[in-house]
Image (spheres, rainbow, N blue to C red):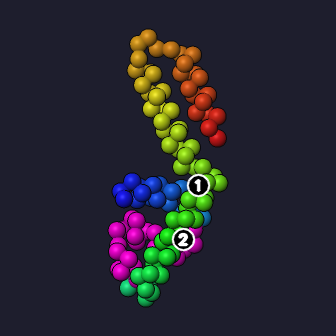
Amino acid sequence: MLEKKLYVNALYDFYHSLLTEKQRKYMDLYYVDDFSLGEIAENFGVSRQAVYDNLKRTETLLDDFESHLHLYEKYTERSSRLEELRALLDKEPFSKQQAIEMIEGIENLD
């Protein structure tokens, strides 16, 4: 459950500007402020089911954005490669050519 929440939060960080104001409000309250479905429903004067449905549709939409744009995938790949590069720079003997190849690989992610 925590892994899914972290994933949805990451997608939300990348794609929140593509959502409607209502979708952003629900997502902020549920995923950022840790409100329950009931609390959100009470604040908006709707049913818990309506909040749940809106959140699920929004999560699906975020997945769709990611499947087309791959921003989170590229971010995680870039982070992984940068970590590898940091480890390489700490190694003795240092291989400048290998570092250049890794940097070029990072640059070519986009």
Residue 15 in sight? no
Residue hosting label 2: 57
Residue hosting label 1: 66
The relative height of residue 47 versus residue 79 in the rendered view (above or below) is below
Report the amino acid beneath label 2. Answer: Arg
Left or right, 103 with reference to 92: right
Q: Quick one: SS at disc 2?
A: helix
The relative height of residue 46 versus residue 26 in the rendered view (above or below) is below
Q: Quick one: SS at disc 1?
A: helix
Segment tinted magenta in the rendering: 19-41
Q: Which quadrant holds the C terminus?
A: top right
Left or right, 79 with reference to 100: left
The relative height of residue 97 versus residue 51 in the rendered view (above or below) is above
Q: Which quadrant holds the N terminus?
A: bottom left
Report the amino acid beneath label 1. Answer: Glu
Q: CA distance from mark 2 to mark 1?
A: 14 Å
Label 1 Cα neighbours within 10 Å, binned few <14 / some 14-19 / many ≥20? some
Q: Looking at the image, which residue sits at the far top?
A: 93
